[in-house]
Amino acid sequence: MMLNNELSAIEDAIRDCQRCELHETVTNKVIRKGSDDPKVLFIGEAPGKNEDETGVPFCGRAGTILDEIIGYMDLPDEDWAVVNTVKCRPPKNRNPHKMELQSCKPFLIKQIELLDPDLIILLGNTAQKAFCPDHPLEWGATEMIEDRCILKIYHPAALIYTRSRRVDQYRFLDEQRHLWQ
């Protein structure tokens, strides 16, 4: 029960946040979806239009691809969660600025601490820059960072626009399957 209270408190703090200008233009803050006790935590970049409208991460086209990835990984609902590096949609879906990433990082770190996953999967370069800017990671490779196992894969949106990366993505996942099974 204490964990649920702490998760609720951080989620309330995110809803109330005004640390950067992004809060001025959002419809909904996008906080998290999935389990309160995940084995695997996916970290995405920033909310898009659909996410801003609903308050739910990865609910648009990229979300459909992420759902396919989760299915390919054979992860039951209780074993995964997804958050973004920033909780507010940047105007015109631009990449988050460094200051915006830094403003949201304490929330991201607290979410990681409370959810306490066995594996963190960074979805693309922005997630890596936000979580571990001093640790360049190769696509599909794992590394231990701050006592956490980290895997970097392509962001689902990249798979929409460059379909040829899907083969690599599934190869990455097959090579690292031991991390969550």
Image: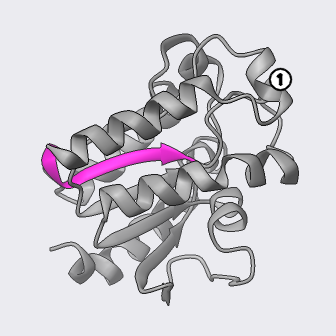
Q: Is residue 55 left or right of residue 48?
A: left
Foreground of the two, 156 or 166: 156
- Of 174 and 144, which appears nearest the observer? 144
Q: Quadrant of residue 164?
A: bottom right
Residue type, numbered disc 1: Lys
The kind of secondary structure element at disc 1 is: helix
Image quadrant occupied by the C terminus: bottom left
Q: Mark 1: give few (<14), some (14-19) or many (20+) Cα within 10 Å.
A: few
Please determine whether, in this image, residue 27 is positioned above or below residue 99.
Answer: above
**Segment tinted magenta in the rendering:** 77-84
**Residue receiving disc 1:** 92
**Residue 1 image point, x, y percent:** 14, 43
Q: Which x, y percent locates residue 178?
A: 22, 82
Is residue 33 in view? yes
- Residue at image coords 69%, 61%: 130
Tell me residue 146's x, y (percent): 50, 84
Please tell me whether residue 54 belongs to the stretch shown in magenta: no
